[in-house]
C-alpha cells in the first residue's frame, strides 16, 4: 500500500517524506517551524506533539489530549488504564492538572515522586468524585490503579518523539499541477481503466485543476507592466470561448463564471504514455463536446486577463497568444495553443 501511495503522490507532484517515528510528531514539528501551514489528520496525537494548526474538530490542548491518550489507548500504548473509558478520562483531565504528566515526561521535578503524587490524586478523584466532573465515583477503578501507571517510557515517547531534524528536511517547493501522462499511466496500471474511462474521469476531476493552475501560474510569473510573457515549459495554453454568454454563478459566496476550454491538448497529453495496444484513436475517446466547462472566480479570471492582455478594453472575454507570431495580419492576437486545425473560437481582446 505504501509504494502505490507514493507513486500517486509523485504523479500529483506532491512532496512527501518518511517520518522517523510518528507522522503526527514530524508534522507538528514542521507546523511549529512554519514549514507547513497546518496538519490535516483525524489523529489527536497531532495536538499531543504540539501542532499549532490542525484541520479537525477539537478544542483540547496538547496536555489534555496527551492525558486522555494515556488513560485510554494510543499508538504507543494499546492498553491505557484498564477499565477507563473516554468519558471517565475526560472527567479526570477536567479535575486534575494535565501539565503534571508532561513535566514528568520531560524529567522535571523528580519524575518518580511526581507520578506517585499524581496517582494519589487520581485515586482520590476516582474514589470520591469531589468536583463532580466524573459524574459518579469509580471506587473499583481507583483500587485497581496500578503503581506502574502511567509508564514513564510512554510519557517520554510523547514528550520527546523521534523526528527528522528541521535542518535535514528537503526543501519544500511551490505547488505544481499533476503530471497528466504519468498519472494516467499509473491509474491504468492500478485500476485497469481504458482510455475512454480515463478521459471521462480526468475531464471532471483533473483537467479543471490544470486550467486553474495555469491561470494562477501566469499571474505569478507575469506583470501587466512588462512587454514579455513568461510561459512555463510544458504548459498547454487553452483558448477561452467568450464567457460573456455564460450566466454569472456564485459558489460559496464567490462570484464567477463558467468558461469553456478546448480539451484537445489536455487529452493528447493525458494519453501519450499509455501502451500502444491499449490506446485508441482520439476520435474514439473524445467525448461528444470539444470543451470542458470550468468555473473560474471573477477576481482570478479578470486578474489573468489584465496580466496577460494589458491592452484589453475589459476582462470579459479571452483569447490565447503566441509570442513567436510575427504575422502582421494577426498583430495583437497571439495563439498559445499552436493548434493547426479545429474550429475553436478565438476572441480578439485587442479590437
Image: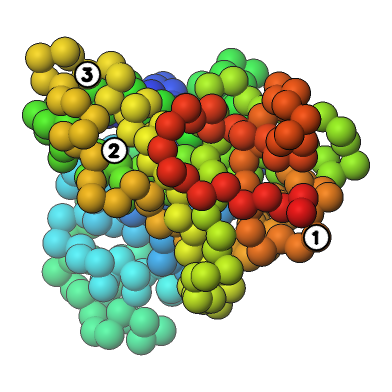
Q: Secondary structure at mark 3?
A: loop
- Label of residue 313 in the image: 1
For disc 3, the neighbor class at 10 Å (few under 14, some 14 to 19, many from 20) is: some
Q: Which mark is residue 274?
A: 3
Q: Residues within 10 Å of mark 1 (few under 14, many from 20)?
A: few
Would you say residue 173 is visible in this rendering?
A: yes
In what element is the residue under mark 2?
A: loop
Q: Please state if 139 lies on the left or on the right of 120 as rendered.
A: left
Q: Position of residue 332 (x, y in %)?
A: 77, 40
Does label 3 or label 2 sit earlier along the sequence?
Answer: 2
Q: Are marks 3 and 2 in contact (CB under 8 Å)?
A: no
> In percent of the image, x 66 and y 64: which residue is there?
316
Q: Which residue is mark 2?
A: 76
Q: Is residue 130 visible?
A: no
Disc on the earlier residue, 1 or 2: 2
CA separation in Å, label 3 and label 2: 44 Å
Location of residue 183 (image quadrant) = top left
Check the image and report above or below for 108 versus 13.
below
On the image, the x and y values in percent for residue 53 come to 55, 54
Amino acid at each position: 500500500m505504501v509504494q502505490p501511495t507514493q507513486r500517486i503522490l509523485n504523479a500529483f507532484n506532491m512532496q512527501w517524506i518518511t517520518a522517523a517515528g510518528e507522522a503526527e510528531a514530524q508534522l507538528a514539528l514542521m507546523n511549529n517551524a512554519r514549514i507547513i501551514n497546518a496538519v490535516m489528520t483525524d489523529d489527536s496525537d497531532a495536538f499531543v506533539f504540539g501542532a499549532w494548526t490542525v484541520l479537525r474538530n477539537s478544542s483540547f490542548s496538547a496536555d489534555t489530549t496527551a492525558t486522555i491518550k494515556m488513560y485510554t489507548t494510543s499508538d504507543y500504548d494499546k492498553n491505557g488504564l484498564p477499565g477507563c473509558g473516554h468519558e471517565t478520562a475526560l472527567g479526570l483531565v477536567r479535575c486534575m492538572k494535565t501539565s503534571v504528566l508532561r513535566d514528568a515526561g520531560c524529567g522535571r521535578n523528580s519524575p518518580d515522586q511526581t507520578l506517585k503524587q499524581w496517582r494519589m490524586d487520581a485515586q482520590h478523584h476516582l474514589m470520591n468524585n469531589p468536583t463532580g466532573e466524573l459524574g459518579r465515583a469509580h471506587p473499583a477503578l481507583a483500587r485497581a490503579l496500578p503503581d506502574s501507571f502511567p509508564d514513564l517510557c510512554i510519557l517520554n515517547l510523547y514528550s520527546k518523539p523521534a523526528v527528522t531534524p528541521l535542518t535535514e528536511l528537503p526543501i519544500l517547493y511551490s505547488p505544481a499541477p499533476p503530471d497528466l501522462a504519468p498519472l494516467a499511466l499509473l491509474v491504468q496500471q492500478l485500476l485497469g481503466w481504458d482510455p475512454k474511462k480515463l478521459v471521462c474521469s480526468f475531464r471532471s476531476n483533473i483537467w479543471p485543476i490544470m486550467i486553474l493552475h495555469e491561470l494562477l501560474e501566469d499571474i505569478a510569473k507575469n506583470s501587466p507592466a512588462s512587454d514579455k510573457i513568461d510561459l512555463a515549459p510544458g504548459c498547454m495554453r487553452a483558448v477561452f470561448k467568450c464567457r460573456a454568454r455564460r450566466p454569472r454563478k456564485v459558489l460559496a459566496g464567490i462570484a464567477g463564471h463558467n468558461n469553456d476550454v478546448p480539451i484537445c491538448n489536455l487529452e493528447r497529453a493525458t494519453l501519450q504514455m499509455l501502451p500502444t495496444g491499449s490506446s485508441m484513436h482520439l476520435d474514439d475517446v473524445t467525448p461528444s463536446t470539444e470543451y470542458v466547462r470550468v468555473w473560474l472566480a471573477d477576481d482570478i479570471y479578470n486578474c489573468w486577463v489584465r496580466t496577460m492582455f494589458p491592452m484589453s478594453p475589459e476582462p470579459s472575454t479571452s483569447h490565447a497568444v503566441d509570442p513567436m507570431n510575427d504575422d502582421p495580419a494577426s498583430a495583437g492576437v497571439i495563439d498559445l495553443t499552436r493548434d493547426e486545425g479545429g474550429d475553436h473560437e478565438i476572441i480578439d481582446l485587442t479590437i
